[in-house]
Image (cartoon, rainbow, N blue to C red):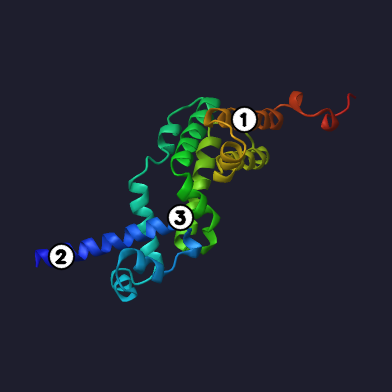
């Protein structure tokens, strides 16, 4: 019985590793159950016996991959009370994670619409949470919040990091400096009339 259980666990693990490999090389959209079965050295029916649907399999794949990473820690950012320090710490943490996981993350974000809805919502919810944690210490009104949050959303985006660092060759530190400057300038312009562009200043009475 023990040997049988070990064989079942090993087969399940091979299937998960096969899915992780394919997601990280061809991407989720091009990954098929037949491809996973071939990579794992099993038949398609065996894959379905362990994972009755793609949502369960993809969740197991995501959980396994994340267990091998050092994910961002927004709780740690939240303990930093000074807004600009929190912003820089959060972006540095995110960009470190993006660089370490770039091959997989590129394909997962590219193929996000091919993922089960549960995982799509998980990714979108995580990105939204990162925005909120970085926005929280800034003293902005509800009207100002929309503009500032949009810029923070751009700053925390994987695609922003990839454009700056992979396509244009910036270091992670340079990318943090660029996005922090953009965000802090946006906050200053949104909250202080002295920082508004001349075209939108109110004329003197």
Q: CA distance from mark 3 to mark 1?
A: 30 Å
Task: Indicate which disc residue 137 carries.
Answer: none
Residue that carries the numbered disc 1 in the rendered image:
178
Q: In the rendering, at what x and y percent does residue 2 appear?
A: 10, 64
Q: Position of residue 6 (x, y in %)?
A: 16, 62
Q: Quadrant of residue 150?
A: top right
User: Is 65 on the left-hand or right-hand side of 189?
Assistant: left
173 and 141: which is toward the camera: 173
Mark 2 / mark 1, whichever is N-terminal: 2
Where residue 139 sits: x, y (%)?
59, 31
Q: Secondary structure at mark 2?
A: helix
x then y, percent, for residue 1: 9, 68
Quadrant containing the C terminus is: top right
Q: Which label sits in the foreground, 3 or 1?
A: 3
Nearer the N terminus, badge 3 or badge 1? 3
Task: State the residue in front, 204 or 59.
Answer: 59
- Image side of residue 200 versus residue 162, left or right: right
Q: How crowded is the residue under tag 2: few (<14 C-alpha within 10 Å), some, or many (20+)? A: few
Mark 3 = which residue? Answer: 25
Disc 2 or disc 3, which is closer to the eye? 3
Q: Is residue 34 above or below residue 152?
A: below
**Does label 2 or label 3 sit earlier along the sequence?**
2
Q: Are marks 3 and 1 in contact (CB under 8 Å)?
A: no
In the rendered image of this protein, does residue 78 appear above or below residue 37? above
User: Which residue does the image show at 40% across and 41% down from the upper left?
Assistant: 71
Disc 2 and disc 1: Cα gap in Å?
53 Å
Left or right: residue 192 compared with residue 76: right
Q: Residues within 10 Å of mark 1 (few under 14, many from 20)?
A: some
- Residue 5 - label: 2
């Amino acid at each position: 019985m023990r040997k049988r259980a070990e064989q079942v666990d090993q087969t399940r693990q091979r299937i998960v590793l096969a899915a992780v490999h394919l997601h990280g090389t061809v991407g989720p959209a091009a990954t098929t159950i037949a491809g996973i079965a071939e990579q794992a050295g099993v038949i398609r029916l065996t894959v379905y016996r362990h994972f009755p649907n793609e949502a369960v399999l993809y969740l197991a794949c995501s959980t396994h991959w994340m267990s091998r990473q050092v994910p961002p820690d927004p709780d740690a950012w939240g303990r930093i009370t000074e807004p600009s320090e929190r912003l820089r710490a959060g972006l540095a943490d995110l960009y470190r994670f993006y660089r370490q996981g770039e091959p997989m993350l590129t394909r997962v974000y590219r193929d996000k619409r091919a993922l089960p809805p549960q995982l799509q919502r998980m990714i979108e919810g995580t990105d939204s949470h990162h925005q909120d944690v970085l926005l929280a210490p800034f003293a902005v009104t509800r009207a100002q919040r929309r503009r500032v949050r949009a810029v923070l959303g751009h700053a925390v985006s994987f695609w922003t990091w990839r454009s700056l660092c992979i396509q244009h060759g910036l270091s992670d530190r340079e990318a943090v400096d660029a996005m922090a400057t953009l965000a802090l300038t946006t906050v200053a312009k949104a909250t202080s009339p002295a920082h508004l562009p001349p075209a939108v200043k109110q004329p003197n009475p």
